[in-house]
Amino acid sequence: MLKKSSEPAGAIETLELLEARLRWLSSWTIHNANHLRESVDGLKVGGHQASCASITAIMTALYFRALGPNDKVAVKPHAGPVLHAIHYLMGSQSREQLEAFRGFGGAQSYPSRTKDRIPVDFSTGSVGLGVAVTAFASLVQDYLIAHRLMDEAQAGRMVALMGDAELDEGNIYECLIEASKHDIRNCWWIVDYNRQSLDATTTDRMFSRFDDIFETCGWRVVTLKYGKMQEAAFAEPGGELLRAWIDDTPNADYAALTYLGGGAWRERLLKDLGPAVKPILDARDDDALAALMTNLGGHDLATLVEAFDACQDDVPTLFIAYTIKGFGLPFAGHKDNHAGLMNPPQIAALRERMDIAEGEEWEPYAGLGGNSAEAARALVANCPIARAKRERPWNVAEVPEIHPPAGEDQSTQAAFGKILLDLSRIGGALADRIVTTSPDVTVSTNLGAWVNQRGLFEHQEMVDVFASARIPSPQKWAGHQAGQHVELGIAENNLFLMLAAMGLAGDLFGERLFPIGTVYDPFIARGLDALNYACYQDARFLLVGTPSGVTLGPEGGAHQSVNPPLIAMGQPGLRHYEPAFVDELALMMEEAFRLIQAEDGESVYLRLTTRSIAQVERTDDSWKGGALAGGYWLREPALGAEAAIVYSGAIAPEAIAAWEALKDDVPGLGLLAITSPDLLHRGWSARRSARWGGKGLSPSHIETLLAPLSRDAGLVTLLDGAPAALSWLGGVAGHRVSPLGLDRFGQTGNLDDLYRYYRLDVDAIVEAAAELFLD
């Protein structure tokens, strides 16, 4: 049972004034962008006046009443203008930014952590992801508290504001299951249940099931269906019939009646309920009746404040707040209002109704009397939410030199596990801030030894039953609050949202972590939207995709990756390395830890393999700079050489063997190790852009690497992945290219059979080189 709010009536009235300000400012910001600002291309700028209007009361109750200084909010994408209006009232957003809404350099279309000037806790835009990430952020907060990196008293609530249509997103339910497993706390999800999506009104059927779904997962569900005006009307003669009619009326009918107004409400209620409801209807004119029927819980400030005040414990809570899409606007309830815009006469009528003088549209408290304006200013001034972005913590841990594991034949995947184990044993600030996670592939991606050393993160002590029963097992996994591995279920989307939340720990909570997530390389594609979401808001982490390519062999096509190198090349904020040798891997892991905490850094993706190969002997460290920049000559070409073999990753032994077979027939033949097609392409692209922009820029790394070759030289490129990841090298200096790689799904088999079938073996490389010269 919700306890009653102690908020005085005067404060509720002031909140109502602020809610009207937010509805006006968000509407005016969108109107200005579409109707007043000069348009050079004639395109509709857009914005979502109706979606903003449905949530202004909820956001008013949150930002000016319920939120504390440590609470974080993911605002539904289409309510971005309301968030900007809130900060405009607080003085942390400028009029210039609002006037440039959706323009170059202006307030962003959807809340953006990296692009907006106001503090945005979580970027939103890809629906559902901003909701789910709050649950993982709650788990990260608990992790920091358990590891004594954060005081319990500083804990905040992670809040997601979502449109009801977002509940169709599958990733929300994957997240809900995982959140239940980890017993998350301090999380609110608030549904703006306006019962309209982009195309139509939403179905009624599922909302009768959400209580069961969420309560089964340990959530409290609070439904805010009626406002105080409706609750009072239910006590009048005929009121219980009215309540039952509201409960039973389909969403589409309710929306249509809202749009049609008081006369339509009166006619329909008389038709459906007859004389029993006449006392309620007779006591109200059409405008008052329309106000009564749209007085839903999500628009009633007293109801909202009461509900939020009653849920101040740490139990995760789903609020279902019934609202009207376009509330207070001329197209309220219309099924096509999602992208609807008020025309100039309509916005003028709204301005007049709010007593805002023409020319004062941008004034924060225009149209309010002196006392009312003063009360509103005081309430805004005293709300404790953050008004500026948190200063980001950089360089929080010294990165030690990482030495490669010893051994003549090694795989990069096994070496990765050994390096982490060594870091765990050495200890120190870096090791203590590493937190690993994996979607049920912890053992098969070589994280097992790390977990043996550091343990699983669990709220409650978890005994290793097998160890207690003296059953032999290499995995000795104890769970406790000091654990540094978060074990996830098989849902790659959750993995990337977990990495996003951990990678934002410094920004959200002031304490940077070094997150490492492992996943089977081909299944990166399963969570690609969430990976892009994490990178878009500059979350920092190390992603390890392993095993990769057909080199996985007997596992077959479903487990063999083809296009991840291309994914990495197209993903901003994610640096891709594909080491062939373990000394390259050690160097790149060291670089990854530096980049995670560097102001100019980014996340890193390592594509590793289970194939053990002979390690190369090094005479010096001259190769290291090139390896980190994307490539280096394993065998230097002669000046003016006519050909080079270019390889990336696990296919190195075939490339080396082919070089040995061809070196006498092709004098000066070079052997180029590509450690990052991604970095090389970035550098080349930046060089081209700078050239056409009139800026001076030294040659890119790949231009420098290929410079010794003859202008008409040929390149044989090969990798265990899509050949396009390397074939573009022919465009750098006009060299002819014979690309080898995977362009179709793999199948089972041993490596000799697979490499021969997919033309990745030595014979294929020699034949490709011969084709270059024949051409």
Image (cartoon, helix red, strand yellow):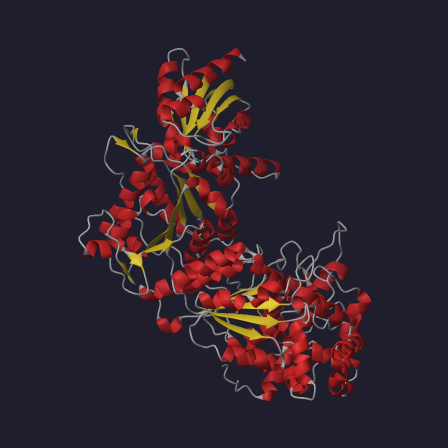
Residue 567 visible in image = yes
Residue under the image location 47 percent in, 51 percent down: 493
Quadrant showing the C terminus? top right
Instruction: Looking at the picture, tell me which residue is in the foreground, 218 or 248.
Output: 248
Image-based side of 84 in relation to 482, left or right: right
Image-based side of 462 in relation to 651, left or right: left
- Residue 475 image offset from top left, x and y in percent: 25, 49
Q: Establish if 769 lies above or below 216.
A: above
Q: Establish if 294 lies above or below 37.
A: below
- Residue 330 image offset from top left, x and y in percent: 76, 69
Image-based side of 185 in relation to 322, left or right: left
Quarter of the image where one finds residue 108: bottom right
Q: Establish if 272 lies above or below 650.
A: below
Residue 392 visible in image = no
Image-based side of 773 in relation to 48, left or right: left
Residue under the image location 29 percent in, 53 percent down: 431
Instruction: Looking at the picture, tell me which residue is in the foreground, 317 or 580.
Output: 317
- Residue 376 image offset from top left, x and y in percent: 62, 81
